Amino acid sequence: MKLHEIAHARTGDKGDVSNISVIAYRAEDWPRIHDALTPERVARHMGDVAAEDVTRYALPQLHALNFVIRGALKGGVTRSLALDAHGKCLASVLLELEL
């Protein structure tokens, strides 16, 4: 099962930092998401994008996790030659994680 089957995501960015929130569709899926998405597993799944640092914040009342990934945007919107310098597609990458 892929993460996108039980959760959706929202993203944000500031400078070279990407922020990805993963939100369970159903409250009963929250424990599975919480247990499966460790900062280490997210970093491995994201590969070079998460090379610097991944910090996880749990928001159990919202059935959500928030990941702050430093160094993900290759210098940020105004300094990067990346096609998606804002990092909006990073949520799609994370939602493809196999649970």
Image (spheres, rainbow, N blue to C red):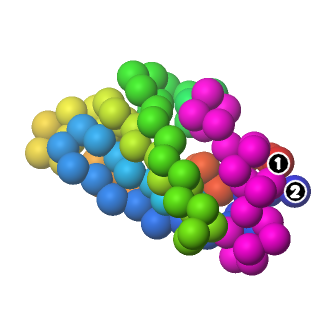
Relative to 78, 24 lies left or right: right
Q: What amino acid is at disc 2?
A: Met
Q: Which of 19 and 33 is in front in this view?
A: 33
In which quadrant of the rendered view does residue 53 lie?
top left
Provide the secondary structure element on which disc 2 rests.
Answer: loop
Q: Is residue 49 left or right of residue 92?
A: left
Query: Residue at the location (63% across, 67% down)?
Result: 63
Q: Tell me, for residue 72, which label it has, or none.
A: none
**Rendered image quadrant of residue 26:** bottom right
Residue 32 is a magenta residue: yes
The residue drawn where x is 67% and y is 43% is: 37
Amino acid type, callout 1: Leu
Going from N to C along the chain, the mark reached first, 1 or 2, is: 2
> How many numbered marks have been drawn onto this rendered protein structure?
2
**Dots 1 and 2: beta carbons under 8 Å?**
yes
The residue lying furthest to the right in this view is 1
- Residue 41 lies in magenta, yes or no? yes
Q: Residue furthest left?
A: 78
Q: Residue furthest top?
A: 52
Dominant SS in magenta: helix
Task: Give the extent of the magenta segment.
Answer: 24-42
Left or right, 19 with respect to 4, comes to left
Identify the image quadrant of the N terminus.
Answer: bottom right
Which residue in the structure is indicated by mark 1? 99
Residue located at (79% from left, 66% from top): 29
Q: Residue at x 14, y 37 (%)?
A: 79
Q: Nearer the viewer, residue 3 or 86?
A: 3
Q: Does 63 appear above or below 72?
A: below
The numbered dot on residue 1 is 2
The image position of residue 77, as x and y in percent, is 19, 47
Residue 90 on image: x %, y %: 48, 51
Q: What element carries label 1?
A: loop
